[in-house]
Structures are given as structure tokens and as C-alpha cells.
Amino acid sequence: MTFRSNPIKFGTDGWRGVIAADFTFERVAKLAPLCAQVLQESNPHSNLIIVGFDRRFMAEDFAQVVAETLQDTGFDVLLSESYAPTPAFSWTAKAKNALGALVLTASHNPAKYLGLKVKGGFGGSVSEDVTAKIESLLNSDTPISQKKGSITLFDPWVSYCHQLRSLVDIDLLKNAILSGKLKIIADVMHGAASTGLTRLLDCEILEINAPRDPLFNGGAPEPLPRYIKDLFHQVKETAKTNPHSLRIGLVFDGDCDRIAAVDGQGNFCSSQILIPILIEHLATRRKLKGEIVKTVSGSDFIPKIAQLFNVPLWETPIGYKYIAERMLTSQVLVGGEESGGVGYSHHIPERDALLSALYVLEAIVSSEKDIGELYSNLQKQVNFNSAYDRIDITLANLEHKNQLQQRLETTPLSEIAAKKVTDCLAIDGYKYRLEDDSWLLIRFSGTEPLLRLYSEAPNLKLVQENLAWAKQWATLI
């Protein structure tokens, strides 16, 4: 039997592949020095690369291979001595004036995947130009160096935690926890967020799904309702035993760059809900300045909140690297995407789930309101109510994907779910606005036969109608 690996191709944030089939020691050893070579083109005075990893299967072993290969090709390596959040390695790259960071992680993907994220020395995801240059070198020889580099182990948590503590009122949060005013339950999904809040707040935080489990309990480390049944249960139990305290469930993805929450009443709060709360908190209580950056899949609520607080708005394609690019040229108060990534240019141009968690906690404690109440108050201020959902459909093959894509290009949709299309935005996929004030986004994965469908509407029934129509449209071709 002959096995054929998929080509190395970078997606919205790094290259990912199935372990042993696509993601192998040989391929990673080939790729790592090419990444370093391209990163050095923009920073020829540095020779230092940060190498880190999360808690996935054999991630530390792959990190060791990356470090040794970089050493053999003349680069100096700071190799993490433990797992840590991806943004911790992005921060280290910036703090150490390194060429960048190579992080072994597959983020929120299922257990069989591992990946390599490439971070620039500025502390964020590199641009498409950089990853395209790396891909163009894959058939070239590995760089040769006359001088061997060095490998130094380091603790990635120390500087990172110091940085995050400097951005929030840690004493306010710690006192609220120790007094019983605030109850926190953190679902770390067996991933790199484990121990993070305890380290930052210097007091014990209840974690669930804390032990390392490379199989992720049979699911995926993605902050979605279907994967966090334990968290819903724990928050509801806390409501019974501590009915008068502020309470919140926080959930982090596998490498801790995405966040979601569960409010005190047990309702799921995606970043579509958290981003408006974060905008209000940073603009009003913290008096910070800057624009709001959202992706094309972000809620229509976000522009209304930006207008409410008189801050500029910028919209990008989906993928945090586009938000990061904007952060490098503009002061950004909050940059966020619907999948849970939120970041701030007063930190690094990178989504950071632990910092977002601290800001959400600060908003709750300083306002003495549950996140559900904070969100509801904002809805009332701008007179906006909506429901949102997203589904992914696995297509038969890449040919099916290409057929759908060609049909959208050649035969524009004029009606969806018996509703007239009033506008179409095509900066990333096809976002159709409909006559009932709802929208549907049809978007294809860049590397897999996968169709992503997003919709927002005045109520959940309309959202489900839009998604059901789009699913049927895709499967009938």
C-alpha cells in the first residue's frame, strides 16, 4: 500500500497535518530552517528563534527536532522547557527581539493533527507573503551553516505572566475571588491554558479537563457548546451553592489563543458576545483609545458598538493575521474574530485568550454585573437583537469544493431561503445580505474540502433557515 502525504500548505495560521501521514519528523526538519531563513530576511541582525509547543501528542518531541535542526543550520534557539499558550511564545519573540517563534500546535483541530505556527519578531502571525516565500523554498536545499548554533532552555510563563499582570488590576480580581464575590470555573480543554489563571491571579482557580489528554476526550479542543457540557454543568451547580456571587465559566482552546465563556445563568457566550463587552470595558472603564477591527464573519452588533463609543471600525478577511497586519499600522483597541480570537495592540498583535479572560473578569468585577447583563444592557443602548450560528460541512472531495466555488463565481445567488439578496461582499468567501436584515456567509477552507457556513439574523429560527438552505444548496450539486 502506498501512502501519499498532502502538500505542505499554510492556512490562515500556520501549517497543519495529520500526524505520521502529513506531519512527520522529516518534513518538520525540512521546514523549520526554511522558516528561519525567511524570517531572517526582515531582521538580519538577529539569529535567535523561539521554539515552543502545546500539549498535543508528541508536540515536545517535534519541538526538540525543530530546535536541533535550527541549531545544525546555525541558528540560536530558545527552547521552551514546558508547554505554554501560543501567545506566550509570540510575546517572547517580541521581548527577546528574536527572528520569531515556531510553535508546535494544531490549535483547535482534532487529536490526529499537529501543526507549525510561524510568528514574526513583532509578536504576531506572519503575513501571506512570508508563508508563500517559505512554501516556494520547499524544493530547495536545506540551508548550510559553517557554525553550529546553540540551544538554551527557558520558562515561557515568567515574562508572559509579568506582561499580562501589568495590563490589568490583578489585586481587584484576586480580592474578589478570595472574598467569595467572584467564582471562576476554567475549562482548559486538556490544553495549554492549564495553570494559566492560577499563575496570573496567584490564587487557586478551579479547572476542569485539566490533565493532559492528547485525544481530548474524543472531541476537539475548540470552545464550542458541543464540547463543553462539563462546564455548563459546573456553572449551574455553582449557581445553586453560591446564588449571590458573580460567576463565570471560561473556556480556552488547545493552544490558548481562543476564548469563549458561560455566563452566570449557564448561557454560552461566544466572542460575538464577548467582543462588545470588551470594547465597552476598555473604552469606558480603562479609557483606552484605538479602532475596532472585525473580520467579515463578525456580528453586525460590533459596528453599532463602535459607533456607540465613537471609535473607528475596520473590516478584514477571516484569519487573525489580517487583524495583526492592521495592528502593525494602526492603534487597535480590540481586534476580534468570531471563532474566539481577540487581541489588543497595546499588548502584541496576536490573539490572547488569557488576557481576554482577565479583561472580561475585570469588566464583571468593576461593574458588579454578570456578562449576560452587560451584553443585554449594550443591546438596549443600540436597540439591537440578533442570533448567530455557524456550521461546517465536509465535502466529498476537492473537486466538489471547486464546483461549488465556480458556481458562486459564475451564477451569483439572487435569492436565499425565499428571501431576496440585497448585497454581496466577496472579500473572503461570499457574504450575502438578505431583505429580512439577516446575512449568510459561504466560505471555503483553503486547504481542505470543507465548506463553512455562517449566519446572523434577528432570531435563531431565521438563522437556522439560512443555514439549512445553504447546506441543501451545497449537497445538491
Image (spheres, rainbow, N blue to C red):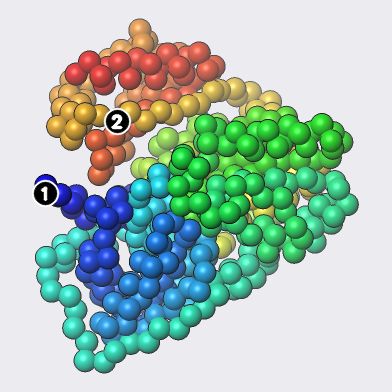
User: Dot 2 lies on which element?
Assistant: strand
Residue 37 at least partly seen: yes
Image location of residue 35, percent across then percent down:
28, 69
Q: Residue furthest front?
A: 1
Is the residue marked by circle 2 packed among few (<14), some (14-19), or many (20+) residues within 10 Å?
few
Image location of residue 317, percent across then percent down:
36, 43
Image location of residue 200, percent across then percent down:
68, 63
Asked if residue 186 lies left or right of residue 28, the reply is right
The quadrant of the picture occupied by the C terminus is top left
Residue type (three-letter) at the residue carrying disc 2:
Thr
Is the residue marked by circle 1 packed among few (<14), some (14-19), or many (20+) residues within 10 Å?
few
Above or below residue 433? Residue 419 is above
Residue type (three-letter) at the residue carrying disc 1:
Thr
Q: In the image, which is nearer the foreground, mark 1 or mark 2?
A: 1
Asked if residue 410 lies left or right of residue 147, the reply is left
* Quarter-of-image position of residue 244: top right
Q: Residue furthest top?
A: 418
Residue 85 vs residue 329, the one in the foreground: 85
Residue denoted by label 2: 394
**Mark with earlier residue (1, 2):** 1
Image location of residue 468, percent across then percent down:
38, 16
* Residue located at (39% from left, 80% from top): 77
Residue 314 at least partly seen: no
Above or below residue 230? Residue 160 is below
User: Dot 1 lies on which element?
Assistant: loop
* Residue located at (19% from left, 79% from top): 143
Above or below residue 90? Residue 407 is above
Asked if residue 236 lies left or right of residue 57, the reply is right
Answer yes or no: do the residues labelled 1 and 2 have beta carbons within 8 Å? no
Q: CA distance from mark 1 to mark 2?
A: 24 Å
* Residue located at (65% from left, 29% from top): 267
The numbered disc on residue 2 is 1
